[in-house]
Image (cartoon, grey):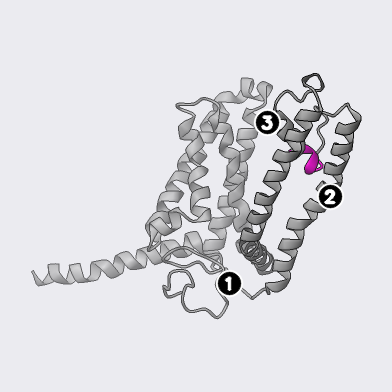
């Protein structure tokens, strides 16, 4: 009985040690094992995406279809095991599952299983390319991580302003589209208000597909005003983000991942995770 009690007392630390070792290999890029794992992972991702792209070529699929099918399932099973191990070695698996990398890791394996029900959906596996964003951690490109963090902070800070801007532009395209519907006839392509609004959006954003164009003098005058207005409107969101970026200063960050929630982007001298408070 005493031996059994001692074994039970030692079991949790053993499991904790196993999880920390696995976390160090899978999530950390500061150790040789972690760096090797990430490099191997990126090579596998590139190889799997290449196989999917080759499978989309008719001549290649006709000759090597079975081989490419086996390669696709091999990498899918490999990434499935990796995803499960990631969930097992973090203290808060749900936190990681809903994070950016967690969602991408899940989306990287779903299309293959989905192809059993919806043939052709396996070509969506190219989303695996998003997983190579981890290369910034592997190569210790902290400067790029800082720049990406700066950009994300600026976009989040300017989100409300851009939303207000878009809510202002929306009535404009409806008004311009409705006016063009009244001015032009169905013979010129403006068959309905929704189609005219589509023209207003294309013109206001200076895309200019040319599939619909006004033919009357009044319609062309209105179109000219919309085009000129489009140039000034495009500069607004750019200016909003630029101002927010100028107000946001970059800080040195570490490549260390939190063992509990797997979040990254901590300061180099941080001892606790800024997202969940766990010890680093």
Q: Main secondary structure of the magenta part?
A: helix
**Which residue lies at the image location 45% right of the left edge and 34% below the top edge?**
113
Relative to 172, is 28 above or below?
below
Q: Position of residue 194 (x, y in %)?
A: 68, 31
Q: Quadrant of residue 154?
A: bottom right
Determine crowd level at label 2: few under 14, some 14-19, many 20+ residues with C-alpha closer than 10 A: few
Q: Are marks 3 and 2 in contact (CB under 8 Å)?
A: no
In the rendered image, residue 217, in percent from the top left (x then y), is placed at 91, 31
Alpha carbon separation for disc pair 3 and 2:
23 Å
Asked whether, in this view, residue 105 is left or right of residue 170, the answer is: left
Using residue 224 as the reference point, say whether residue 172 is left or right of it. Answer: left
Determine if the magenta segment contains residue 202: yes
Q: Secondary structure at mark 2?
A: helix
- The residue pinned by badge 2 equals 231
Could you tell me which residue is drawn at 51 percent across and 35 percent down?
Answer: 111
Front in this rendered view, residue 235 or 267: 235
Q: Residue at x 54, y 32 (%)?
A: 122
- Measured along the vertical axis of the image, is residue 42 above or below residue 212? below
Q: Nearer the viewer, mark 1 or mark 2?
A: 2
Residue marked by disc 1: 254
The residue beneath circle 3 is 194
Q: CA distance from mark 3 to mark 1?
A: 50 Å
Question: For residue 179: magenta?
Answer: no
Q: Which residues are magenta?
A: 201-206
Which residue is at a point 48% across and 62% down the rendered structure image? 25
Q: Quadrant of the N terminus?
A: bottom left
What SS does tag 3 mark? helix
Q: Earlier in the sequence, mark 1 or mark 2?
A: 2
User: Of the residues under marks 3 and 1, which one precedes in the sequence?
Assistant: 3
x and y percent of residue 2 in the render? 10, 72
Q: Judging from the image, what secondary structure is the residue with disc 1 in?
A: loop
């Amino acid at each position: 009985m005493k031996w059994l009690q001692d074994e039970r007392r030692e079991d949790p630390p053993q499991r904790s040690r196993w999880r920390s070792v696995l976390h160090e290999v899978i999530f950390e890029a500061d150790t040789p094992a972690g760096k090797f794992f990430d490099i191997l992972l990126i090579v596998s991702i590139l190889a799997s995406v290449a196989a999917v792209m080759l499978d989309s070529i008719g001549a290649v699929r006709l000759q090597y279809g079975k081989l490419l099918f086996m390669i696709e399932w091999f990498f899918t099973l490999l990434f499935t095991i990796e995803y499960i191990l990631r969930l097992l070695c973090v203290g808060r698996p749900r936190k990681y599952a809903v994070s950016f990398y967690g969602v991408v890791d899940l989306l990287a394996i779903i299309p293959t299983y989905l192809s059993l029900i919806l043939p052709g959906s396996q070509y969506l596996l190219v989303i695996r390319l998003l997983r190579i964003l981890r290369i910034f951690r592997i190569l210790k490109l902290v400067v790029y991580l800082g720049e990406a963090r700066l950009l994300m902070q600026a976009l989040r800070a300017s989100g409300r302003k851009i939303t207000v801007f878009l809510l202002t532009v929306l009535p404009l395209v409806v008004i311009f589209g409705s006016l063009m519907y009244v001015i032009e006839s169905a013979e010129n392509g403006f068959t309905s208000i929704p189609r005219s609004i589509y023209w207003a959006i294309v013109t206001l954003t200076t895309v200019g597909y040319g599939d619909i164009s006004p033919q009357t003098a009044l319609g062309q005058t209105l179109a000219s005003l919309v085009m000129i207005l489009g140039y000034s409107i495009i500069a607004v969101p750019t200016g909003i983000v630029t101002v927010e970026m100028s107000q946001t200063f970059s800080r040195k960050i570490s490549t260390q991942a939190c063992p509990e929630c797997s979040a990254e982007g901590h300061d180099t001298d941080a001892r606790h995770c800024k997202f969940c408070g766990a010890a680093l």
